[in-house]
Image: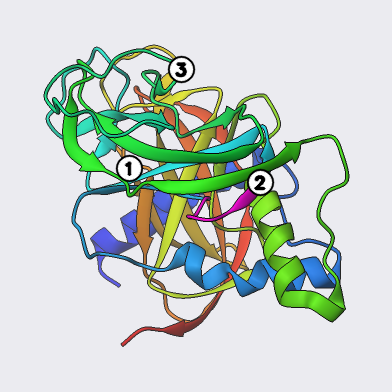
């Protein structure tokens, strides 16, 4: 290891030792129930798979076409190839999300996206939302736009979800005699359950204790604040960073997503690791931090 490498590892160790000392004690782990745990792990690969078919794309991080859910519905936004920044801040490589509910794409695609109940704006740089929907089928599509609410040519495929009831009643239960069918119902209800209120930084697609193949996608979310590239000086916003260390605490890598990205491509050798997340202010100060999340890399793609 040369002098510069030693300095880099030492700096990484110092930065993340502070995080480890002041982080919450526990990250969200796998379900305690054996059937729920099996069901959750059956979907790990699809949540973390690397998809580079389009260099720039938006998608729903947690929902898929045909899901059956209860209301309110938690909807998470993913974007690849661009950063996120609140509305009103010109940036040629960043923008913000809009959710089209039961409405088609705008015909005049260079006009400003209207403000309405079917054109929901997330101009604070949000990464997700809780959506109240009446029972029945609903179409959803994400549309990414610039500082002036004019669409980029970046939108998700339209999906249809089916709202069957309001939350508050019995949640779906997995029946071992009908595992595939009831696992699907439980999983769809679980990933669409609204997150607790308050400020938090979290991994959208991983829980502590999961095993992944490398490389894998780490999808990041924040509650109570918006995303913006470093140095943008927008109010109540920041950007993501993450650090990876061995289970013994030896730093492996650290990456700061200073351009406002909300997804990272992580490549690691096989082994056991812990991942810690930070949400940094535009001046680099730590606004939020997560507890260490245990991840096992079980194989590497050729």
- Residue at the (41%, 54%) spot, across then down: 10
Of labels 3 and 1, earlier in sequence is 3
Residue 268: percent from the left, percent from the top?
41, 73
User: Which image quadrant: the C terminus?
Assistant: bottom left
Residue to which mark 3 is pinned? 117
At label 1, counting other C-alpha atoms closer than 10 Å, the crowd grade (few under 14, some 14-19, many 20 or more) is: some
The residue singled out by tag 2 in the image is 69
Badge 2 marks a residue whose secondary structure is: strand
Give the CA separation, mark 2 to mark 3.
20 Å
Q: Position of residue 131 (x, y in %)?
A: 58, 29
Structural distance between the alpha carbons of marks 3 and 1: 32 Å
- Of 247 and 47, nearer the camera is 47
Tell me where residue 237 appears, x and y as whole percent: 41, 21
Q: Farthest residue to the bottom: give it.
A: 302
Query: Which residue is drawn at the image coordinates 42% and 79% (left, top)?
Result: 269
- State which quarter of the image contains the N terminus: bottom left
Q: Is residue 220 positioned above or below 116 on the image?
A: below
Q: Position of residue 136 (x, y in %)?
A: 62, 39
Residue identified by numbered label 1: 257
Say which residue appears at 37% left-offset and 49% top-offset. Answer: 263
Q: Is there any visible trace of residue 227 in the rendered image?
A: yes
Q: Which mark is residue 216?
A: none
Stretch of the chain drawn in magenta? 63-68
Instruction: Name the element at disc 1.
Output: loop
């Amino acid at each position: 290891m040369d002098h510069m490498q030693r300095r880099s590892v030492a700096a990484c160790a110092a930065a993340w030792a502070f995080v480890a000392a002041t982080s919450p004690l526990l990250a969200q782990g796998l379900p305690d129930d054996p059937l729920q745990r099996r069901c959750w792990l059956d979907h790990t690969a699809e949540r973390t798979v690397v998809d580079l078919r389009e260099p720039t794309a938006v998608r729903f991080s947690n929902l898929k076409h045909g899901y059956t859910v209860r209301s309110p519905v938690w909807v998470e936004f993913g974007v690849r190839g661009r950063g996120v920044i609140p509305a009103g801040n010109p940036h040629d490589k960043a923008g913000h999300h809009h959710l089209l509910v039961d409405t088609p794409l705008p015909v005049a695609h260079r006009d400003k996206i209207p403000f309405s109940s079917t054109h929901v704006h997330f101009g604070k740089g949000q990464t997700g939302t809780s959506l109240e929907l009446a029972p029945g089928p609903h179409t959803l599509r994400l549309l990414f736009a610039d500082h002036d609410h004019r669409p980029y040519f970046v939108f998700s495929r339209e999906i249809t979800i089916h709202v069957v009831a309001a939350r508050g009643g019995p949640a779906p239960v997995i029946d071992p005699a009908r595992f595939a069918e009831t696992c699907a119902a439980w999983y769809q209800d679980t990933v669409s359950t609204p997150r607790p209120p308050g400020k938090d930084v979290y991994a959208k697609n991983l829980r502590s204790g999961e095993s992944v193949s490398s490389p894998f996608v780490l999808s990041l979310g924040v509650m109570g604040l918006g995303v913006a590239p470093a140095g943008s000086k927008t109010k109540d916003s920041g950007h993501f960073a993450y650090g990876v260390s061995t289970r013994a605490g030896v730093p492996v890598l650290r990456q700061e997503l200073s351009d406002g990205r909300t997804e990272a491509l992580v490549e690691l050798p096989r082994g056991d690791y812990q991942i810690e997340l930070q949400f940094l202010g535009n001046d680099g100060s730590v606004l939020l931090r997560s507890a260490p999340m245990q991840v096992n890399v079980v194989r590497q793609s050729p």
